[in-house]
Amino acid sequence: MTKLDNFDASENLPASFPYHVAIIMDGNGRWASKRGLPRSEGHRRGVQTVRDCVTGAIELGISYLTLYTFSSENWRRPFAEISDLMGLLKAFIKRDLADLHKNNVKILTIGTDERIDPEVLKLINEAVHLTQHNTGLVLTAAFNYGSRDEILRAARSLAAKAAAGEIAPEAITAEDLSSHLDTAGIPDPDLLIRTGGDLRISNFLLWQSAYTEFVFLDSYWPDFNKEMFARAVAEFQGRERRFGGLGAICSA
């Protein structure tokens, strides 16, 4: 395992390097419960991991990083926990936005504005606006996001255009649907990492992850670090991506 601090991209990174990495940050509550701490402490520690993860992505040279920060299903959680999560998000933006901007990070969001506190929404929009011209890492926060809802909204938009005679139903392509998703303009993820031990993707980037490589980790999100990040990337590099075609061995 190569530690990130000593990671020389020119010597260690082959052509099969993930351009876009998506992460399901799972296990904050279980991390805290295991230590006899309130779930809120797990979320607070998880925010620090986000900081380390963004730094790791920049150091590794990853172009796009998408984090599943709050799903549309998370509204089912207790009000106190949701309130704490929103407070942490506000604190993160207020504390870290200047550094992210200084490091040339471009911030995007996917999801809907429904039910989001106006103060939170204002801070998010300010972060997106401030960093819109940055050319470094593209950091996308999947916030109040659910992939089925995203696909449904895209389908409805295309259906409305078809009903208005703007496009023939039989002419609609996969590219047309992709262009109506929240992720329009963002490349599909090459690698998806999930912490916390669960082996599912929980309504995250369903359309976009058709050919994504998956790495599942037993470690809870607060324990995720740069070394684990680099190790997941190294595992990706050891895989052969065929996209439905024949691999090098089979075609030889």
Image: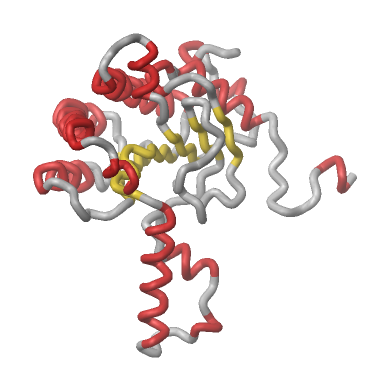
* Rendered-image quadrant of the C terminus: top right
Q: Is residue 26 left or right of residue 235?
A: left
Q: Residue at x 43, y 40 (%)?
A: 64
Q: Residue at x 16, y 28 (%)?
A: 91
Name the quadrant containing residue 17.
top right
Relative depth, front residue between 182 and 5: 182
Q: Is residue 10 left or right of residue 33?
A: right
Name the quadrant containing residue 226.
top left
Q: Is residue 200 left or right of residue 159?
A: right
Q: Residue at x 38, y 59 (%)?
A: 149
Relative depth, front residue between 28 and 24: 28
Image coordinates for residue 185, horizontal then vertical, percent: 41, 56
* Rendered-image quadrant of the N terminus: top right
**Colouring style:** secondary structure
Relative depth, front residue between 227 and 102: 227
Image coordinates for residue 43, horizontal then vertical, percent: 28, 24
Q: Residue furthest bottom?
A: 165
Q: Is residue 40 above or below residue 113?
A: above
Name the quadrant containing residue 83.
top left
Can residue 98 be seen here? The reply is no
Image coordinates for residue 235, horizontal then vertical, percent: 63, 27
Q: Is residue 163 above or below residue 63?
A: below
Image coordinates for residue 36, horizontal then vertical, percent: 32, 10
